[in-house]
Amino acid sequence: MDQYLIAVIVGIVEGLTEFLPVSSTGHMIIVGHLLGFEGRVADVFDVFVQLGAILSVIFIYKERFVRFFTKDGWDMHKGLSVWHIAAGIVPVMGVAYVCYPLIKKYLFSPFTVAIGLVLGGLLLMFAEHKTKGREAELVDDVDKISMKQAMWVGIYQFLSLWPGFSRSGSTIAGGLLVGLSRQASASYTFLIAVPLMFVACLYDLLKSLKYLTADDLTILGIGFVVSFIVAYWSVLWFLKFLHKYDLTSFAWYRIALACVTYWYFYM
C-alpha cells in the first residue's frame, strides 16, 4: 500500500482512539499488523502521530495550560494545580521507565492486545455498575478533585502499561471508582495525558530519530497533521457524549474488537 495512504490511515486511527477509552496503542498494533507497517520507521511514526494528538488537547484546554504557568496554577487550594497533575503521572512514569523494555518485548502483539481490550472493557463495566444511581454524589468539576483522588487515578493508570488496556479507559474508570463524574474523569485524563505522553514520546524519539531519512519526514508530517485534526474533533465529541451516555458501549466495542482480533490473527 502507498506509504502516504498508510500515513493517513494510521493518523486517523491514532486521532480517533488516543483519548477514547478503547486503547490507541492496541489499535495501532492491530492496524500496523494488518497494513504490514512495522519496523523502526513505523515505531517512530507511531510516536510522532501521538504528538499531533497531544497538541490537539493543548489547543482545547489552552487556558488551563496557560494557568499552570502562573502562581495560581501551583496553588492546590485554588482548583486543579500542577501538583494534582504530578500526582496523576509521576508514579506511572517511574514504573513505565523501569518496565518499558519488558513491555515492548513481551506485550506488543495482537494476542496481548486482545487480552487488554477485554480486561479494560470489564473494568469500564464494573466502574459504571459501581456508580449507577450515585451520580449526584460524584465530583463533577475537575477543579474540585482532591489530591487523594488524583493519586488514585494515577495508580489506576498503571493498568494502561498493558497494551490494549487503554490509558484513558483505566483513568476514566479509576476516576469513577474514586468518586469523580465521567466528565471530570475525562477532563483530568486529558490534562494528565499531555505531560505524560510528551515525555514518553520525546524519550522514544530521541532513541529512534537516527533511523529516519529525509524521505520519511513527509510521511511523519502527514500523520502528525491528520492525527491532530481527528483527535481535536474526537475529544470534543467525546466530552459531549459523556453528558448523555455512559461508557458501556465502549466496553462492548472493546470486547467485540478483541474477539475479531483473536479470530483474524489466531484462528
Image: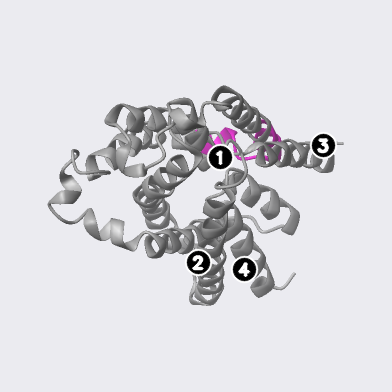
For residue 108: magenta? yes
Separation (CA) of disc 3 from disc 2: 33 Å
User: Residue 16 has which mark?
Assistant: none
Residue 158 visible in the shown view: no
Which class describes the residues within 10 Å of circle 3: few (<14), some (14-19), or many (20+)?
Answer: few
Label 2: state its secondary structure.
Answer: helix
Separation (CA) of disc 3 from disc 4: 26 Å
- Please report whichever mark, 1 or 3, sits nearer to the chain's N-terminal start: 1
Which class describes the residues within 10 Å of circle 2: few (<14), some (14-19), or many (20+)?
Answer: many
Nearer to us: label 4 or label 2: 2
- Please report whichever mark, 3 or 2, sits nearer to the chain's N-terminal start: 2
Residue 129: image quadrant is top right
Identify the residue position indicated by label 4 in the image: 7
Identify the residue position indicated by label 3 in the image: 266
In the displayed orientation, state which residue is furthest to the top: 130
Nearer to us: label 1 or label 3: 1
Residue 62 visible in the shown view: yes
Instruction: Give the image location of residue 98, x and y in percent.
Output: 38, 32
Q: Is residue 108 left or right of residue 139?
A: right
Q: Nearer the viewer, residue 241 or 153?
A: 241
Q: Is residue 7 above or below residue 114?
A: below
Q: Is residue 60 left or right of residue 163?
A: left
- Please report whichever mark, 1 or 2, sits nearer to the chain's N-terminal start: 1
For badge 2, the amino acid type reads Phe
Identify the residue position indicated by label 1 in the image: 166
- Please report whichever mark, 4 or 2, sits nearer to the chain's N-terminal start: 4
Separation (CA) of disc 4 from disc 2: 13 Å
Instruction: Give the image location of residue 169, x and y in percent.
Output: 55, 38
Separation (CA) of disc 1 from disc 3: 22 Å
